[in-house]
Amino acid sequence: MTHPIFLVGARGCGKTTIGVALAQALGHHFVDTDHYLLTSTGMSVADIVAQEGWDGFRARETQALKSVMAPDTIVATGGGMVLAEENRQFMREQGVVIYLRAPAQILADRLEAFPEEGQRPTLTGKPITDEIVEVLAAREALYRQAAHHVIDAARSPEAVVEEVLAVLQMARAS
């Protein structure tokens, strides 16, 4: 049994894609906190925010994180999971936190290419590239603070998965 692995990073960094591939490679379960919220509440992120505001959503997100956390599990977290110090501390103490880092322009290109993947209400009301630049600037330090390892997620999913597996292997060996 191994500790859970938490994937953090901005929308479009590949948390779900990488998480699914890692789970297959390691024989672990994969869970996405946004998907968990959708199935447990019957509401999308947008619905929850519309009904309960961002604070209500963030509180549910923290609950989701604690509900899905289990050994041998890869957890893809929502982009704002790191905003609460409680969540950053919980992930660091309970498992291995990997920050999938990519430049704002790459994230924006990915989200524009697959708009339905990031069905989230806008945080700033600005065009996607401007919003991502702003959100990354605000969260970069929090992602780094939460992370045990920072991985360059601008590369192909295969390359990212290989690097994550290598980092986990080294961590286990030490």
Image (tube, rainbow, N blue to C red):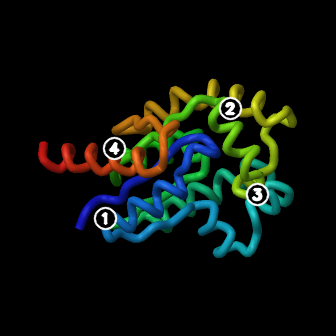
> Which structural element holds mark 2?
helix
The image quadrant that residue 150 belongs to is: top left
Cα separation, mark 2 vs mark 3, equals 19 Å
Label 2: which residue?
Answer: 135
The image quadrant that residue 110 belongs to is: top right
Residue 55 or residue 149, whichever sits in front: 149
Residue placed at 39% from the left, 51% from the top?
A: 161
In terms of sequence position, does the residue under pointer 4 or pointer 1 come before the other?
1
Tag of residue 116: 3
Whether the residues at callouts 2 and 4 have beta carbons within 8 Å, the answer is: no
Residue 61 or residue 158, whichever sits in front: 158
Indicate whether 124 appears above or below 37: above
Tag of residue 26: 1
Cα separation, mark 2 vs mark 1, equals 32 Å
Residue placed at 39% from the left, 65% from the top?
A: 23
The amino acid beneath tag 4 is Glu
> Which structural element holds mark 3?
helix
Cα separation, mark 2 vs mark 4, equals 26 Å
Residue placed at 81% from the left, 49% from the top?
A: 121
Disc 2 versus disc 3: nearer the observer: 3
The amino acid beneath tag 2 is Val
Locate residue 74, reporting x and y percent: 41, 61
Residue extending furthest toward the left: 174
The amino acid beneath tag 3 is Glu
Locate residue 37, reporting x and y percent: 64, 66
